[in-house]
Image (spheres, grey):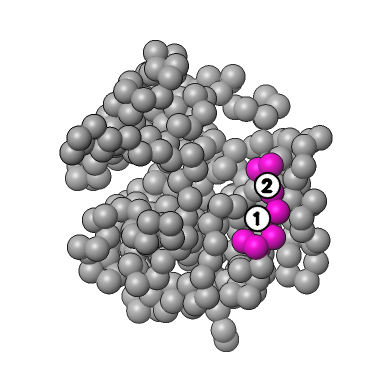
Amino acid sequence: MADRVVAVMTAYCPDDHLRDVVAGLRVQVDAVVVVDNTPAGAVGADAYLTPGDGLTVIANGRNLGLAAALNLGVAAAPDSDFVLFMDQDSLLDPGVVQGLVAVMHQDDRVGLAGPAPWSVAESRYLDPRTRLRDDVADMAVIITSGMLARRSVVEEVGGFRDDFFVDCVDQELCLRVRAAGWRVVQDKRIRINHSLGDTRWYGWGPFTLRATHHATWRLYWVGRNTVVMLREHARRDPRWAVTAVAILAYWALTVALVEPPRLERLRTMARGAVHGLGGRTAPEMFPGRSI
């Protein structure tokens, strides 16, 4: 019997680009589930998509967060062997799903497999280290968009962590999957066109810096969720932990140098980190969600 692959993706105040993303998915998977976190009254996925014939749209009417939305999508596809997770800002090239399923069948210990994020505009891997890796490389973490998961593995580890809301959702799942004894891999021969949002480069002589300019409230989740993961996984995975600390420090540096209002943004990130130490969350950091 052929493997059944269902794509699960989230939407939040999308534009007509959503049609292209879904169209690219439908020719490679058996069904698509779009979980729409667009708040009531705003233009959501239903403005661009017509459910039916293998396409399901779940309109939440509020922002439940990325993790909760993905979990809803998985629950809506109970007959799948594999689940492909996607973002609304990523386009799937032909053959990606077939290639990732092949990676899964090469080793039954692979729980999650992903393509290598690629910048079409710059004609390069988003992570320069990708060039140095094996074609199929074991990874500490991979991104959500383009991630193919064994449905049984997602269920085994309990799905995505709802309290993370946004940011680090994919990393946290990968860490738990690996802790459960499964491999997380990336195939650099398979690429996914992925956007990092409002990314800008700054240069001072030979020194260059990439800043994301995310909304200030997102910095709270970057700080909180990174510290939660460090608290829970650093001892088991010290190499990943060192990288995570370095990335968090890089975020703080870019905010301090080129992302005004600098002090407010740094305070927000620091507040998140403190809450991560104590396992707390700030209710006001859930935009668009009724709590």
Magenta span has 94? Answer: no
State the image quarter where residue 203 is shown.
top left
> Which residue is under mark 2?
14
Q: Position of residue 197 (x, y in %)?
A: 49, 43
Q: Is residue 178 visible?
A: no
Tell whether label 1 touches label 2 (CB within 8 Å).
yes
The segment highlighted magenta reads 12-22
Q: What residue type is labelled 2?
A: Pro
In what quadrant of the picture does the N terminus appear? bottom right
Query: Residue at point 73% right, 35% down?
Result: 39
218 over 265 or under it: above or below: below
Query: Residue at point 51% right, 46% down?
Result: 160
Q: In this view, does 135 lie to the left or right of 96?
A: left
> Which residue is under mark 1?
17
Q: Position of residue 253 (x, y in %)?
A: 29, 26
Magenta span has 16? Answer: yes
SS at mark 1? helix
In what quadrant of the picture does the C terminus appear? top right
Q: In this view, does 115 lie to the left or right of 92?
A: left
Instruction: Compare residues 184 and 205 and report the one nearer the observer.
Output: 205
150 over 67 or under it: above or below: below
Q: Where is residue 132 in the image (x, y as percent from the top left)?
A: 20, 63
Query: Residue at point 46% right, 25% down?
Result: 220
**Farthest residue toward the front?**
205
Q: In this view, does 192 lie to the left or right of 11?
A: left
SS at mark 2? loop
Q: Can residue 86 be seen in this view?
A: yes
Mark 2–mark 1 distance (CA, rounded to whole Å): 7 Å
